[in-house]
Amino acid sequence: MDVEVVAGGGEVGPVSVASGKTKTEAKAKLKEIIRDHDDGLASGPANYTVAEAVKSWLAYGLHGRSPNTATNYRTLCEKHIIPDLGARKLRELSGEDVDRWLVGKAEVLAARTVRLLHSCLNRAVKFAQARDKVKRNVVGLCEIPEGEEGRPSKSLTLDQATALLDAAEGSRLYAYVVLSLLIGARTEELRALTWEEVDLVGDPDKEIPPWIAVWRSVREGGDTKTKRSRRSLALPKRCVEALKAHRLQQRHDHKMAGEKWQDHGLVFASLVGTPLDAHNVRRAFRKIVKDAGMPAYYWTPREMRHSFVSLLSDSGVPLEDIARLVGHSGTAVTEAVYRKQIRPVLLQGAAAMDDLFAR
């Protein structure tokens, strides 16, 4: 049976109660409660758990996050944090508890996943701290261990890229594949692209080639990944040809859909004009990869962007130019993400791609 000790009451001050297995333990807890009170710190409910803190953060702390991000956070919390640490009383969660848990996760999960788990737990405890459920956040003091090396990004060789383009020709995703490979746009940028942001003629008198404005994405709020990601790119001839054919096909789709057509002005849309989601693109892309004679499970749409960087580098385009073409704020990001594909070099994007994929 726990021993209970009481302090305060009457003129002395507010009543404080603490209990423990021994009188010494109870007195120690009572001293901590009194010290926190004197310091102006709310002690919070003694039985408030980590699970309650995490669920509260998931319910009320994700305003402004995209639905996909919120779903991802919820999945991580429900699969890893709540089962492992949820039963612990939040006030009793120690830095050592968190360290042990993170190290265990780092042995079986990718480094990015471990960082996300730490971030979710850290934010949940900060959310609870701001609501006087706990007096300090031990998670923020813990180091994040390196997890397992994640699935490395790959790039297509010139022969593989050519095979992929040939396999895509005639498919509804052909123009999408051409733009991904030949201008290096992110899949989230292409899915948000509208015809108003595409100029297939340019201005020959002013030596302005056909171009595309990569100014938006399907991210929350419609912004590109960074401000530097907003860019206008010259279109290689094969992109212009593919987009012209794609526009004719879309006009046919519009006619066939009739009243079912929903006009969003999108370049890449469904048969009734609605936006494509990432699943639509991945499924169609896997079929093209398979038709190109490559393993479908081995490649993802985002690796066309990696291939763009690799092919430009192999063709002699300087790193600084590649960074601008893919919308990076500087060469450091380009080197860090694509360092296996980068080599020192010297030309320009659209011209180099015209040479590589000349008909």
Image: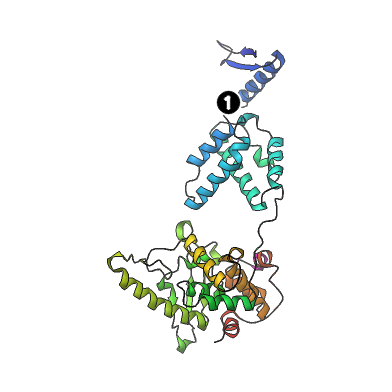
Of the residues shown, which amino acid type is indicated by label 1?
Asn
Can residue 162 be seen from the camera position used here?
Answer: yes
Q: Is residue 77 above or below residue 244?
A: above
Q: In this view, which residue lies farthest toward the bottom?
A: 205
- Residue 27's image quarter? top right
Residue 292 painted magenta = no
Position of residue 278 in the picture relative to residue 254 (left or right): right
Residue 329 painted magenta = yes
Circle 1 packing at 10 Å, graded few (<14), some (14-19), many (20+), is some
The residue that appears at 58% across and 73% down in the rendered structure is 325
Residue 341: % across, % down: 68, 71
Can residue 66 be seen from the camera position used here?
Answer: no
Residue 330: % across, % down: 64, 67
Position of residue 265 in the picture relative to residue 299 (left or right): left
Badge count:
1
**Residue nearer the viewer, 317 or 2:** 2
**Residue nearer the viewer, 125 or 172:** 172
Colour treatment of the image? rainbow
**Disc 1, SS:** loop
Residue hosting label 1: 47
Residue 188: % across, % down: 50, 63
Position of residue 159 in the picture relative to residue 216 (left or right): right
Q: Which residues are magenta?
A: 328-333
Q: Quadrant of the C terminus?
A: bottom right
- Residue 39's image quarter? top right
Q: Quadrant of the N terminus?
A: top right
- Residue 255's image quarter? bottom left
Q: Is residue 215 above or below residue 135?
A: below
Residue 12: % across, % down: 59, 12
Q: In this view, which residue lies farthest toward the left?
A: 259
The residue that appears at 68% across and 38% down in the rendered structure is 98
